[in-house]
Image: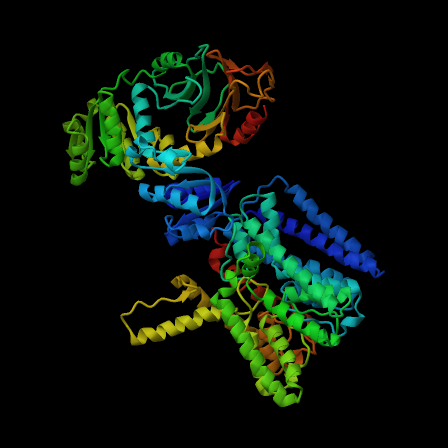
């Protein structure tokens, strides 16, 4: 293993991260806050990374698979620590809590340890949203874009190790062009969302923060009551739509924005994503009308918002759905297990995997009736190879296994079953809030420091889609032969 | 450059691998496995589809392609793909690989606007043909704008250390053991060196006969192992040079076909290749040159070593896969690139050569030549050619009035000059920049 490769990449990403963090300082400057400590930390952080980068300037990066995997894992440790320091400097929380908050930010989970957000300095609120926004598109996609400019070869395996979908499709011959265009789409969506939020009455600061949080499907808000604070239908509908857009495969947007080609929206995954959204939204509306006595419009507004928020793994809240009824909780629970589309900023199982699993099950059933028939699984007209099917099932198994382990861990701490199960799903699926003690109006601060580290690791495992982290535990990873 | 390659076979794969550094490469093929292999290891875009189907090209997002290269195994598919691609997307330059020589006799190239047709079988058999003209050499390269040639020779064991001093010949590469370098002008040569000489035909021939005392001065009898299309093409060239040819082939059908194609002029022997008795019974030890020309490199290597062990005079092996080239070279076998490797090389050299500047490689890719011809009206005339602080492993020359002049100091460029750089491949980018900037 060539550690020069790893350190060079970490230092490059660290430098870029440090430059992004200067925006926090800028916010502190605008709001006349005491940003000096932050500035000193950031200057030191950038200097150290620049120094390592310069020391390794002549080293040509050529990543092997093992190095890529290790780099991505180490990168998340770097993110957790670097992201935590500003939080620890300016608010009265332990360092573990700060790490939890930072990881929750970068993994776009949106679970928070802060009970009273409105008392935090603006630069910290902005810092939290920024971690979402950077993490959303995958810092690696950004890294790959930059890396391949600096170094034309050797960034391919890194892209594979961190992409959020089943497979990262390319639209252009060079990965850097696809990566940079994806960021272009990301920025465009953020700006449009931000502008609309401003038009519907948010101030610029809230609009920027919520746009960052929405497009990254994160869920951090600047207000204790999340989106409910704004009490504005426009804000709710805009956010509902943009959460859905953010959970759609970005390549579909890319094709549409850059090449005026809507074919990306005709995929089976997107079709089912919309169908599930409409179905669960309607179900919840009916339950909501029945339980609360709100008008049908209000019920639909809150229900579709809630389903969008949970399904896309964002985690914003307008109403406390946990208090509706058991049926409502059931519906939201289903949404929690779905997730967004492959190739989007959303986490969770993702619709495409369900499509593959259901189709495989159906094909197996058909095989019982027609034992001699040729039965393959097709998605979007392409025949799936057995390796893809088995890796999907293994993914499902790892997802369930991890969730069970985290559930048991939380349960063993003496918490109730609902908190344990929903908390585990919310953490592993990078959603944010769950039910009961970790519901939309509560936070994760009651966990002790050790628990927070465990949950942080669970968030990273979910974000990196299990394989990238679990491969570290296989003996062959560490063997030279 | 945006490059579109039709065909993900050996040639397509190797082209994609080399060109993906610095260019935007798209590869089209029907074979999913081949495309996956490419996508796994290279930063390129692959498109699955039939190269003769217009809808395949419609999948390409950026419809402006600088270079289209058709390199599937089927000539017809290559030709049709050029027509269809040209009809569907915008293409600036088109290269095609064709197996059948008879296409060369048609005006198909002009009719469908192909910029370069590559006949790999012809390249390989012509290389063998040149070896016949220069029996003592291992490899001969000719150039577009000059009669000077680049010729390599293995120094015989009984030759005493020797320092050639000919006005119009330069030593532009020496391989001693595994070590290759480009020497300054008057370098002493030792037995068993592989020496690369650049010079006029007459002078190089004189040096060849001093350095190689083993090989006869004229080739009269040749053996070709393998009667595939390549074997037949090689035999044809040999027969045209009045050489007596024996072909050895194990497949009886190929034997029959070869006999028919060669009109009974060559002796075709149906035999499994490996028997030692064959060597004695058929008098192969009397052959001046044995060419092992099967499509299987492992076989070619083993057979060449075996023949050398038996004491064969000169053994030439055909190389089909790029991975084996260096191994064959380092085993001391005379290597001639087979059709696939010739196609790969010819295409790369054509891509990297622009108008008046030609790029060629030698010594198995260890060294690179750039050649710049100064034509009438060139903007470089009357300007200074200033050699940069000359690095080791790089040398610069000018051919002026049929004389070879070492370019060690500033010199005024005149019309009809040819400026040449020889460098190890690691320094080739520097040489290229210098050559283009002058």
Is A427 on the left or on the right of B230, as rendered?
Answer: right
* Nearer-the-camera pick, B24 or B167: B24
Asked which colour scheme the image uses, the reply is rainbow
Note whether residue B104 is visible: yes
Is B36 on the left or on the right of A162, as rendered?
Answer: left
Image point (73%, 60%), residue name: A85
Please identify the quarter of the rendering in which residue A41 is found: bottom right
Give residue B269's position: percent from left, percent from top.
16, 32
Give residue A421's position: percent from left, percent from top.
58, 78
Give residue B221's position: percent from left, percent from top.
21, 22
Q: How many marks?
A: 0
Give residue B242's position: percent from left, percent from top.
22, 20
Image point (58%, 51%), residue name: A144
Please tell me whether residue A102 is drawn above or below residue A144 in the rendered image: below
Note whether residue A417 is visible: no
Please tell me whether residue A340 is drawn above or below residue A43 in the rendered image: below
Please identify the quarter of the rendering in which residue B246 is found: top left
Image point (67%, 62%), residue name: A192
Is B275 on the left or on the right of B23, as rendered?
Answer: left
* Nearer-the-camera pick, A14 or B101: B101
Please tell me whether residue A238 is drawn above or below residue A478 in the rendered image: below
């Amino acid at each position: 293993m060539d550690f020069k490769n790893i350190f060079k990449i970490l230092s490059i990403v660290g430098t870029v991260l440090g430059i992004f963090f200067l925006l926090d300082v800028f916010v502190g400057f605008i709001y006349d806050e005491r940003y000096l400590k932050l500035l000193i930390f950031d200057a030191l952080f950038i200097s150290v990374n620049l120094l390592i980068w310069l020391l390794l300037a002549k080293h040509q990066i050529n990543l092997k698979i093992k190095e890529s995997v290790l780099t991505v894992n180490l990168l998340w440790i770097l993110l957790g620590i670097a992201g935590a320091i500003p939080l620890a400097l300016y608010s009265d929380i332990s360092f573990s809590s700060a790490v939890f908050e930072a990881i929750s930010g970068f993994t776009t989970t949106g679970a928070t340890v802060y009970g009273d957000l409105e008392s935090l300095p603006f630069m910290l609120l902005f810092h939290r949203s920024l971690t979402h926004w950077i993490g959303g598109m995958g810092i690696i996609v950004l890294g790959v874009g930059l890396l391949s400019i600096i170094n034309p070869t050797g960034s391919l395996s890194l892209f594979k190790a961190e992409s959020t979908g089943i497979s990262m499709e390319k639209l252009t011959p060079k990965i850097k062009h696809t990566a940079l265009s994806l960021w272009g789409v990301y920025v465009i969506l953020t700006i449009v969302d931000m502008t609309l939020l401003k038009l519907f009455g948010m101030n610029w600061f809230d609009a920027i923060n919520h746009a960052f949080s929405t497009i990254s499907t994160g869920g951090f808000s600047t207000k204790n009551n999340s989106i409910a604070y704004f009490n504005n239908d426009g804000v709710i509908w805009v956010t509902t739509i943009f959460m859905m857009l953010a959970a759609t495969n970005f390549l579909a947007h890319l094709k549409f924005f850059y090449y005026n080609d809507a074919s990306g929206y005709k995929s089976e995954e997107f079709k089912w994503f919309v169908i599930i959204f409409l179905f669960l939204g309607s179900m919840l509306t009916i339950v909501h009308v029945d339980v609360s006595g709100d008008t049908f419009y209000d019920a639909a507004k809150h229900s579709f918002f809630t389903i969008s928020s949970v399904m896309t793994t964002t985690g914003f809240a307008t109403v406390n759905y946990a208090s509706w009824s058991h049926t409502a909780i059931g519906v939201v629970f289903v949404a929690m297990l779905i997730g967004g589309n492959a190739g989007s900023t959303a986490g969770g199982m993702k619709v495409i995997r369900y499509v593959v699993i259901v189709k495989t099950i159906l094909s197996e059933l058909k095989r019982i009736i027609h034992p001699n028939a040729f039965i393959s699984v097709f998605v979007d007209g392409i025949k799936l190879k057995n390796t893809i099917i088995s890796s999907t099932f293994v993914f499902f198994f790892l997802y369930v296994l991890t969730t069970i382990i985290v559930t048991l861990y939380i349960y063993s701490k003496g918490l109730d079953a609902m908190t344990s199960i929903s908390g585990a799903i919310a953490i592993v699926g990078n959603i944010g809030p769950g039910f009961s003690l970790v519901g939309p109006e509560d936070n994760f601060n009651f966990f002790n420091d050790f628990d927070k580290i465990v949950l942080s690791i669970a968030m990273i495992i979910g974000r990196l889609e299990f394989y990238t982290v679990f491969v570290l535990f296989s003996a062959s990873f560490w063997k030279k032969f | 450059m945006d490059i579109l390659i039709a065909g993900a076979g050996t040639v397509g794969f190797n082209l994609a691998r080399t060109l993906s550094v610095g260019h935007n490469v798209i590869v089209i093929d029907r074979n999913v496995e081949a495309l996956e292999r490419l996508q796994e290891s290279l930063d390129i875009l692959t498109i699955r589809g039939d190269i003769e189907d217009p809808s395949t090209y419609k999948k390409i997002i950026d419809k402006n392609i600088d270079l289209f290269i058709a390199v599937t195994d089927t000539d017809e598919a290559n030709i049709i793909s050029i027509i269809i691609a040209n009809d569907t997307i915008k293409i600036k330059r088109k290269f095609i690989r064709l197996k059948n020589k008879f296409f060369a006799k048609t005006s198909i190239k002009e009719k469908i606007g192909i910029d370069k047709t590559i006949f790999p079988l012809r390249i390989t058999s012509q290389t063998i043909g040149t070896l016949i003209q220069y029996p003592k050499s291992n490899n001969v390269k000719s150039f577009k704008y000059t009669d000077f040639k680049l010729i390599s020779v293995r120094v015989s064991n009984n030759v005493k250390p020797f320092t050639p001093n000919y006005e119009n010949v330069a030593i532009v590469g020496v391989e001693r053991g595994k070590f290759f370098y480009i020497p300054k002008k008057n370098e002493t040569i030792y037995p068993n060196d592989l020496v690369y000489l650049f010079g006029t035909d007459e002078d190089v021939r004189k040096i060849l006969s001093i350095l190689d005392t083993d090989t006869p001065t004229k080739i009269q009898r040749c053996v070709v192992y393998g009667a595939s299309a390549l074997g037949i093409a090689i035999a044809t060239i040999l027969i045209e040079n009045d050489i007596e040819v024996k072909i050895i082939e194990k497949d009886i059908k190929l034997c029959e076909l070869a006999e028919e194609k060669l009109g009974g002029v060559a002796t075709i022997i149906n035999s499994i290749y490996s028997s030692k008795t064959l060597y004695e019974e058929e008098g192969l030890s009397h052959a001046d040159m044995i060419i092992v020309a099967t499509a299987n490199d492992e076989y070619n290597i083993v057979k060449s070593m075996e023949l050398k062990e038996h004491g064969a005079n000169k053994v030439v092996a055909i190389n089909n896969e790029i991975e084996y080239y260096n191994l064959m070279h380092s085993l001391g076998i005379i290597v001639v690139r087979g059709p696939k490797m010739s196609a790969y090389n010819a295409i790369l050299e054509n891509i990297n050569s622009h108008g008046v500047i030609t790029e060629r490689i030698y010594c198995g890719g260890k060294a690179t030549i750039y050649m710049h011809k100064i034509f009438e009206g060139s903007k470089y005339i009357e300007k200074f050619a200033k050699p940069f602080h000359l690095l080791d492993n790089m040398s610069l020359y000018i051919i002026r009035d049929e004389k070879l002049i070492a370019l060690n100091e500033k010199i005024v460029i005149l019309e009809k000059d040819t400026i040449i750089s020889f460098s190890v491949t690691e320094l080739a980018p520097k040489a290229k920049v210098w050559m283009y900037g002058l």
